[in-house]
Image: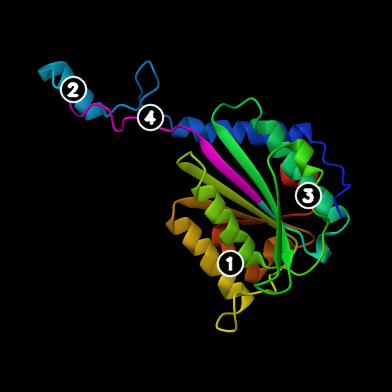
Amino acid sequence: NYTTSNVSPNQILSDEIEYVLKAILGAKQEIRDDVGEEIDVESAIEYVINKNDSRIFNSEEVNVGMSLVITIDNSASMSGDVDDIALKTCASIMNAIKDIKNVELQVHKWSGHTKDDVNISIANNLEELTRLASPNGGTPLGHGIAYATNSIMKMKYAQKLMFVLTDGEPNVAYDDSQNAIEFANNQVFNATQLGVTVFGLGIGYDMDNNKNMRLIFGDTWQGFNSIENAIK
């Protein structure tokens, strides 16, 4: 079954997200030449003095931009208003990036009962977002993060951000050697070690204070229970 949720973007949230993403991208814009290639400042000064241009450019081709993955809990508890909030948040992000150059985005939804039974559906645009699977099954959070990490490492831009949307704690781990919370925390750690910035977004009442989710995501965990609350 496919979702029939309202996936139209919230323009106020889109504007806020666009502002933040442009600020992040702007902070990554080092001094560049007139064709956009990154310049090593000290080497450029040396070139002016000694006409030695062997080390001016930091790389032959600099991929200035952002790879972004939104990975969403699609377990049964996400049905109804929670799924609507998650998809509207995704739609707002998609709307925010449409006029920003060099930003690529994937949206994943995942659910399952065991490590061998994890279902993942993918969207790359608003139309595909309406065809993502409806909520069902359990919460294999660690698997969703691991899949998102694998995907984002194949995307082309060096700046990599992952947003994880969920309404509760994981209940599916890899095997009996780790519990689900430990497994999810290890997947967040693995992603950050690869240079991915991971944000955990909890949808629902008092999710901001969930101790286990803060254990998994650390200081990047943030809870909200409505689009209006997300904007704040």
Looking at the image, residue 115 sits to the left or right of residue 77; the answer is left
Q: CA distance from mark 1 to mark 3?
A: 26 Å
Between marks 1 and 2, how big is the CA–CA gap? 47 Å
**Residue position marked by numbered label 4 in the rendering:** 30
Is there CB contact under 8 Å for labels 1 and 3?
Answer: no
Upstream in sequence: badge 4 or badge 2: 4
Residue denoted by label 2: 53
Q: Please, is residue 34 above or below residue 7 in the view?
A: above
What is the three-letter code of the residue carrying label 3?
Leu
What segment carries the magenta color?
54-70
Which SS does the magenta portion mostly show?
Answer: loop
Q: Write down the quadrant of residue 40 in the picture.
A: top left
Q: Which residue is mark 3?
A: 132
| Quarter of the figure with the C terminus | top right
Left or right of 63 on screen, residue 117? right
* Amino acid at the residue labelled 2: Asp
Residue of label 1 = 216
Q: Does any portion of residue 232 appear in the rendered image?
A: no
